[in-house]
Amino acid sequence: MSTTSHVSAVLAQGGDIPAPHIEYGQLAPLLLVLGVAVVGVLVEAFVGRNARYYVQVPLAFLGLAGGFAWTAALAWRDNPHHVAAEGALGVDGPTLFIQGTILLLALVSLLLIAERGGGRGVGGHFAAQASALPGSEAEQRTAEAGITQTEVFPLMMFAVGGMMMFPAANDLLTMFVALEVLSLPLYLLCGLARRRRLLSQEAAVKYFLLGAFSSAFFLYGVALLYGYAGSVRLSDISAQIGKDAGSETLLLAGVALLTVGLLFKLGGVPFHMWKPDVYQGAPTPITALMASCTVVSAFGAILRVYFVAFETLRWDWRPAMWGVAILTMVAGSIIAITQTDIKRMLAYSSIAHAGFLLMGVIASSPNGLSSTLFYLLAYGFTSVGAFAVVTMVRDAGGEAGHLSRWAGLGKRSPVVAGVFAFFLLAFAGIPLTSGFTGKFAVFKAAVEEGATPLVIVAVISSAVAAFFYVRVIVVMFFSEPDAEGPVVVAGPATAVAVALGVTATVVLGVIPQPVLDLAGQATTHMFVR
Amino acid sequence: MSDFPWLSVLIGLPLVGALLLIAVPRERETLVKQFALGVSLVVAALTGVMAAGFDAGGARFQFTEKYWWIKEFGVHWALGVDGVALTLILLSVILVPLVILASWNEADRSGGSDVPAKRSAKTYFALLLSLEAAMIGVFAATDVFLFYVFFEAMLIPVYFIIGSYGGAQRSYAAVKFLLYSLFGGLLMLVAVIWLYPLSARSVDAGGLGHGTFMFDELSKMSIDGATAKWLFLGFFVAFAIKAPMFPVHTWLPDAAQQSPPGALVLIVGVLDKVGTYGMLRFCLELFPGAAKWATPAVLAFAVVSIIYGAILAIGQVDMKRLIAYTSISHFGFIVLGIFAMTSQAQSGAALYMVNHGFSTGALFLIVGFLIVRRRSARVSDFGGVQKVAPVLAGTFLVAGLSGLSLPGLSTFVSEFLVVVGTFSRYEWAAAASIIAIVLAAVYILWMYQRTMGGPPVPAVEGMKDLSAREKWVIAPIIAIIVAMGFFPQPVLHVINPSVGHTLARVDQHDPAPSITGNVAENGARP
């Protein structure tokens, strides 16, 4: 009874509910990207089938580019350091850097996703109609009709919007919403491969099931932390930890569960099982998007949570994080050795890199933060470039995924093989590539914070990792080409993406100072609380 | 002229040359070769002009340059040479044009017998030139980070040279080479990174008050015991792999057997010197205390390398492998000289690096000529070459005798200095190393006898003697070997001040000759 009267009382005073104050200018990049996604859905509904592609691609491109320009302008004008949207989202240096990185990498991935040219038969990497069963008549009919998929563009924009929100979220509930916004379109996108559709759908289901599990973990962690602190806001949790009050069991269990959810997204061992399957099965442009943007976003979120909410709890989570980092580096590097599929190998390589990146989280210093940001940018570009090359090497059944098919590629198309070798050397961390600069920055931050044993493990796993990168180079350059080998099909957009990847990898390796400065400036005030 | 950025130009020139080579059409093969040779000759000439301006009595590092590279990390593009670095750069720039000339037809016939026929000459020469740039850079770097960058960058061209232009087992050898080197390099990377926070400590805590990678500043820093030992090991293992020392030498024989002889001259002659050069420069001067702590163990490994390499060399059937094992023995001598920490031994070691480069280089080049003629490097495939190709056999003998340190040829001086210098402090090490001198005579002379002596076997009949091009390749090296055997003084004059710096840093003084010491003691007694 009393509740009802209370509610009616509130309703009676309806006019007095304060409207939430939204800083539209500060949130414009995010709103723009999500807005474009919504418009994209409308385009799907109202624009004729043949014209959709030509509307969707420029729209998505403008949305991402506009978002990036706005983000850059925000960072340029004043180094913002405040919360927006009633404290739900943080607008600060690191976040803007991460969002800018995501938008840039999404732009490059968009080039791959939009690629239509150069294919055998009807171009594109995506199934003509996702609902048509693989091998069915319906599938054949849609293929014959020359139907091509354009839903990927709004889906991708939603995912990117979620990715931008994930590291910006200043309370755990917003973060959870962002996690779902970024994940759900990705689950779908994973199942849309044009060729080897069963593998692709299997990947989507695996990703969805495991992703749903990890979301549940995350949410459970949020609930426990709410029980501990009485709030889901990161700064309130931090303040509560500072007071040293409340149940420590709730706190630690909450931190652990939350961390599981976060580690799942970035593929930390032992929550990495989905990565090889999903990376292999998903359409390669989507793999590129996940390997770059999703990893950046997930690291942004974990950095914010650990730097803002749990900073004072450092002594409790550090040992566990050491363990995860070591496991991730070692397992990623060692298992990668046995892989025979290029995409699976790159997936394990991505796991190993996640381990290196976790060292920046463990360092929990301004240097650790800025070096992680730099590493993410460098790794993202190299990753997209590498997957772009993977899309170019094709045989009759689509991409030539098996390593043995790449034999002698260096003789057949020296430029493409050379570029891929360069990306692999960058992954291996050879000097004068961005991979080396990034690793050096992270290692240095870790050594400064006294994590030298961790650096030694990292260095040894780098040596192990070098083995499988080098093995691919051996296959490409030092073995004789197969007469029936794959052909290299270079569509214009893919070529641009590869060129951008190479440029970024060289520039960040040879003259990294400007970007390091930028990352340094972005992190001077750390995350907003 | 002193402001002219000599070293940057020397590094940049071959690199630009390599890039331009890639732009040359594949069909214009002669142009490719002439261009590569031209670039390397210009680099050699420029280095000669620069070296003429080196003042042995002047500042330690000369032709210095220093610009910020990555300010965030405290990294400079800092170059400069002391005597040791200068002689090693000279060695590199003299060898590169000779190697290019010797490899004139390398791309189409090389390595073992079952090698695919035609390979891109353009890529081969571009790789050689980029290797030259990295070699000059690694010796000229006075910033530890920059040194590391060149140290690793050097691996890539070599990896592709062995892997693409080597013999039947080339990819195995290339991967083994790369992984060994990378592993060592990464251990060094940890040590390099560690130096920065150490230098950033306050002056009272033993640091410099600001983080830096500059060698001259770091070498003024005192690092406490345990840390210094770890750092020393990080650097030393990398250099021991590079040098290579027993027991991390196993990549060299494989790499040697598989790689094309021309590139092998640079791998063994120059690249491996980076290991010993690094020990002399970085291990000793950055961590003097730890270096002294490690000396007994290092000497023991050096002696084992000396004898083990020599013994294994005797048993080899492949000439390239054989010479690789002799090099392991010689590198043992160099390490022995460095860690004996007497001025004679260290000057000898520094001189040995140069001499070994020339004498081993000559041996590999001649083996390369033999391979071109016979398509094999197996000792048993030859016999009696002396009769059909006397000039070839003669140069082989001179190079071989230099390899076994015959008095009058260059390596004798350096080996003698090393052994004498070592004896004054570590009699046992010097005495044990003498065994290898006997073994050297066995492996060189036996190889010569089996391949060149006796009646010509059917397979070598009609073998052509050295062509004019090949004579142009080998004559300068033989001339240098003989000249340095009689007049090592100019080189020692340049080397000695640098070695003096190193010894002053490790705070070691030559022990007084023991006999006079005894006499003085006896004299003091009533």
Image (cartoon, coloured by chain):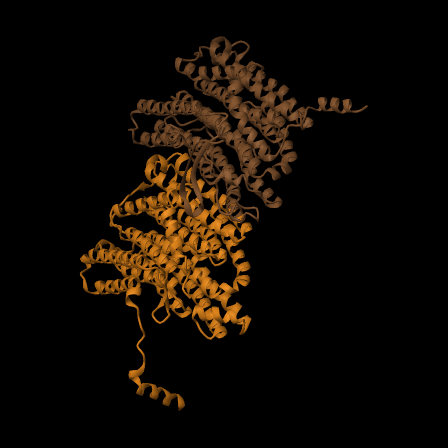
Chain colours: A orange, B brown
Location of the C terminus of chain B (image quadrant): top right
User: With A52 as the anchor, is B83 left or right in this view?
Assistant: right
Residue at 52% in and 25% down: B495
Residue B256 in view, yes or no: no
Residue B116 in view, yes or no: yes
User: With A379 as the anchor, is A323 left or right in this view?
Assistant: right
Up/down of B326 relative to A236, above or below:
above
User: With A208 as the anchor, is A38 left or right in this view?
Assistant: left
Up/down of A432 relative to B349, above or below:
below
Up/down of A311 relative to B292, above or below:
below
Q: Nearer the viewer, residue B496 or A172?
A: B496
Q: Nearer the viewer, residue B396 or B206?
A: B206
Picture coordinates of residue B375 (x, y %)? 45, 20
User: With B312 as the anchor, is A462 left or right in this view?
Assistant: left
Q: Nearer the viewer, residue A211 or A102?
A: A102
Up/down of B300 relative to B479, above or below:
below
Picture coordinates of residue B131 (x, y %)? 42, 31
Q: Nearer the viewer, residue B358 or A340?
A: B358
Residue at 37% in and 69% down: A88
What is the residue that sits farthest to the bottom in this orientation? Answer: A1
Picture coordinates of residue A197 (x, y %)? 34, 55
Kindly indicate the quadrant of the structure image that contains residue B474.
top left
What is the residue that sits farthest to the right in this orientation? Answer: B526
Picture coordinates of residue B77 (x, y %)? 42, 38
Location of the N terminus of chain B (image quadrant): top left
Task: Please tell me how many numbered marks the rendered image carries.
Answer: 0
